[in-house]
Image (cartoon, rainbow, N blue to C red):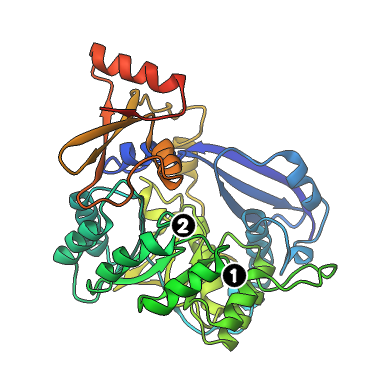
Amino acid sequence: MKITSIESLHLRVPYEDRIRIRYHHFAMTEEHTVYRFHTDSGLVGLGESVGRPFDDKLLAPYIGTDPVDHLMGSGRFNLDMACYDLVGKQLGQPAWKLMGPQVRQWVSMGWWMPCMSPEDSAAEVEEAASRGYRGLKCKARAFYDVVESARAMQQVAPPDFRVEFDFNGSLICVEKALPILRQLEEIPIVKGVEEPIFAYDVDGWRRLHAQIRIPFYLHGTRVVSPPSSRQPSGPWIGLRAGDFEGALCSHETVGDALASGWAFAAANTPILLQYVGSGITTAFACQLGAVMPTATIPAVTAHHSYVDDLITEPHTMQRGFMRVPEGPGLGVVLDEAAIARYAISVQPAPDFARHLSIVTLPGGLKHYYRNLQQAERLMKQGVDETFAVGVRLDEWEDDGSAKFDGLWTRLQESDWPIWE
């Protein structure tokens, strides 16, 4: 079997109305690409990526090759998944059988959300629980009171619900992180924190880790370095030292993901699979999760965010677990009607209004930012007070007022907030 051509289907798949504006503010794109790998045998394999289609130079190495050549590969998972789909279909077997022995039929699957206000965070927990999820990964940022958000989530969550907060280093240092994490320790729903401070601050990370009982998660699981390198990888060093209790296998190549699966299994350390996409990528994540022994932290694909999963049969969720598709290859069938409906040529681009971000500090003091990305970046640099009690960010949509226009214009002129 040879790959003869790759068809890139450029789509615009909207996010659900409930969270569409918030995702826009969080700079998440609705552009989407599905790849159809055509072969000389007539079989078609499915791949997927978020955003615009990959450049032809990334697709060219697959043309004329046998899909088997890309198994356990080092290419982009978005494309290699199509090769697993093809070989599985050729053999009449699910993709996991090409990856290793099966360790589970149901994979722990979680909900994902960007940072939101405490009330909106609680609403997301309720929505997730109503759809069968029992775990949620939430971004934590300096312009929301993460402790207040966690308490609000605790109030509405089922007894067996768990939340992981992803700080992306925004707690900055031990001095800032310690009091906040100590408060989060008292809230039962909080089961883990990802990268509370930057992992390169090895000494600070270890000092903090020694004082906090909440599990620490590292972003990255790559344990195998290229043969030319004589240096061990960062995750491997931290794994051996016991510097974290779990790690994210986030968009890793298939070869790296499976290698880390066995290394982490030997260390009895759990993995969180993070491969973002629609139902296609979710099927791929389930196939990986079926064979990775310690892939037990709820996985994240964010497929629930879209109005359509792009597959004919929805995935099955039950109390926080998703059934591994049993059909050949990835085990899903592309919904051709959805592909036609969301083609970039027919799906209108959303007409979002101009907006700016308002950070409200204790006492009602307001600081204006160009957007939340600017607020996140500058607050990490110490330009503004971070994680203040009761702090929150609100988006001000263009209301046609002279005040809005004046502030918006001034914010474009320099890379600084405007303090009230």
Helix, strand or loop under label 1: loop
Q: Residue at x 67, y 73 (%)?
A: 223
Tell me where residue 352 appears, x and y as whole percent.
35, 26
Q: Residue at x 63, y 48 (%)?
A: 36
Tell me where residue 257 appears, x and y as whole percent.
62, 70
Can you see residue 331?
A: no
Q: Amino acid at mark 1?
A: Thr
Q: Amino acid at mark 2?
A: Gly
Tell me where residue 244 appears, x and y as whole percent.
49, 76
Q: Which mark is residue 169?
A: 2
Q: Which mark is residue 171?
A: none
Q: Residue at x 24, y 15 (%)?
A: 403
Residue holding disc 1 = 221
Quarter assignment of residue 419: top left
Helix, strand or loop under label 2: loop
398 up-or-down from 172: above or below: above
180 up-or-down from 271: above or below: above
117 up-or-down from 212: above or below: above
- Mark 2 neighbour class, 10 Å CA radius: few under 14, some 14 to 19, many 20 or more: some
Q: Split into 4 quadrants, where in the image is the N terminus? A: bottom right
Quarter assignment of residue 87: bottom right
Rounded to the nearest whole Å, what is the CA distance between mark 1 and mark 2? 17 Å
Q: Residue at x 63, y 58 (%)?
A: 77
Query: Residue furthest toward the right?
Result: 228
| Most foreground residue, 353 or 357 | 357
Answer with left or right where residue 77 lies relative to residue 190. right
First-in-chain label (1 vs 2): 2
